[in-house]
Amino acid sequence: MVMRSLRSLSVFVPFLVASVSAFSSVPEGSPSPSPSPSPSPSPSPLPPPVVDLFFGTGGSSSNVLLLNDGNGGFAGEEMPGTALETTSVARGDFNGDGTPDLLLGNRYTGWDNAPNQLLLGNGDGGFDDPIDLNGTDKLSTCGVAVGDVDGDGFDDLVFANGNGCSNGAKQESSIMYGKGGTVFEAPVVLPGGELDGTSAVIGDVTGDGMNDIVLGFQLYGGAKLLKNNGDGTFDVVTLTEKYVNAIGLHDMNGDGHLDLVLACYLQNNILFLNPGDGNFTTSVELPKVGSSSGSSDLAIGDMDGDGAPDVVFCGTYDNWVLWNKPDAHDGDDFFDYYQVVGPRTDGAVALGDVYGSGYLDIVLGGSNYGGESNVVENRGNRGFGRVFKLDQAELKNKYVKDIMLL
Ligand SMILES: [Ca+2]
Ligand SMILES: [Ca+2]
Ligand SMILES: [Ca+2]
Ligand SMILES: [Ca+2]
């Protein structure tokens, strides 16, 4: 997921709120759908992109880079040495050269080794050959995060393991402590148990200056907060028993404390508000919108420029935006309404200003339904325009598991 700040917009357009009766999965008191029609795919040519797009793909297919070619288009590239099931991608700058690098979480399917990998940016928009991380060959990693957990100034790598993103054996989650550059200590098991991890985030949610870890699990673990004690140990708190597919860590109400948004499998999504000490006592149940299997991914960013971060979920039947009220920050009154956007996806979602308009567009990575990936154009004022299909040959029939804008 990519979060970027956006220049402030002064325009705020009021809206209509429609009945929720058509959406049986919507819980009481949660945001209503908007009547706005979803944009349909457009034959319009792609406007010139200003970013590169990286797609982590499942199966045994190479990951794909769509490189902004500077001539108004994307050039598709299959990434050498990444033909593993890449389930998750995180960004870092491991060698400190100012060029973004990537951490790839790869799933061990029970046969060939599938080490997690680093991809170092080469400064030309491309990447060097991947670096396999020692000791991760048989980790079934479904979620990754990069951050300094032990406070030594070097980024550490956290892996949510155990096939929460697919079938297979449960595993413990783990961390590799950074020693500088691309040197990492062997993986160390994190507490929480041998489970079906799907997702990991790193941030100081307890307010003591030390980064904590939140892990999501699909069926058997809910979401667990690993409170960092600062001595290599963690206190584990189970925040919810919900079936978690993806986690967003972001200050959703502007009080300076990191809150949690969970995209859930089969169930309604949920927001947990952090009073500042990591005791997530207030939650806001969010709809799952017409989909039996729930949401496969989420992304957070201020899409209408009102200063309040908004949330996009993608799912089997719909993707939808939840518009965050800029001035109502507690309880069930948190979001204004939700709006269905884009073709159905069931893969991954990321936000970024793809075409340099000043608005965060929605990048949707297709998975189970035809494998199509698209960009939904954000026109501002809570309106969406054209849907641009990313039809590069390299992306055809890929199962997109994660997306990174570069
Ligand atoms: Ca560190
Ligand atoms: Ca902390
Ligand atoms: Ca907050
Ligand atoms: Ca907003």
Image: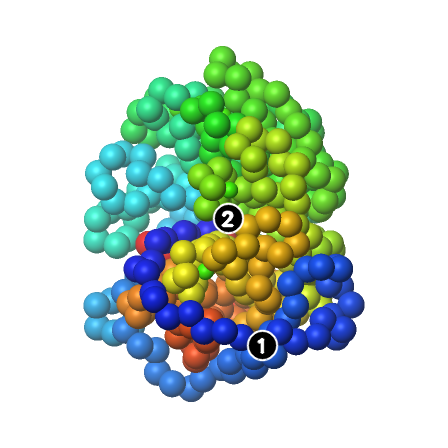
The residue beneath circle 1 is 16
Within 10 Å of disc 2 (Cα), the crowding (few <14, some 14-19, many 20+) is: many
Q: Most extreme residue toward the bottom, as rendered?
A: 43
Q: Is residue 320 left or right of residue 305?
A: right
Name the kind of residue labelled 1 in the image.
Answer: Leu
Image location (x, y in percent) of residue 318: 62, 69
The residue beneath circle 2 is 252
User: What residue appears at the point 69 percent right and 52 percent down from the top-left corner?
Assistant: 285
- In the image, is residue 226 above or below residue 350? above
Image location (x, y in percent) of residue 105: 50, 42
Q: Is residue 384 left or right of residue 288?
A: left
- In the image, is residue 84 above or below residue 380? above
| Display coloring | rainbow
Q: Nearer the viewer, mark 2 or mark 1?
A: 1
Image location (x, y in percent) of residue 246: 59, 48
- Marks 2,1: beta carbons within 8 A: no
User: What residue appears at the point 40 percent right and 28 percent down from the top-left corner?
Assistant: 148
The answer to whether residue 270 is seen in the rendering is no
Mark nearer the N terminus (2 vs 1):
1
Q: Quadrant of residue 119?
A: top left
User: What residue appears at the point 48 percent right and 27 percent down from the top-left corner?
Assistant: 207
Name the kind of residue labelled 2 in the image.
Answer: Met
Marks 2 and 1, how far apart at CA:
23 Å
Dot 2: what SS?
loop
Which image quarter is the C terminus in?
bottom left
- In the image, is residue 279 above or below residue 339? above
- Towards the viewer: 388 or 139: 388
Say if disc 2 is inside 8 Å of ligand 3: yes
Q: Most extreme residue toward the front, as rendered?
A: 327
The answer to whether residue 124 is seen in the rendering is yes
Within 10 Å of disc 1 (Cα), the crowding (few <14, some 14-19, many 20+) is: few
- In the image, is residue 360 above or below residue 117? below
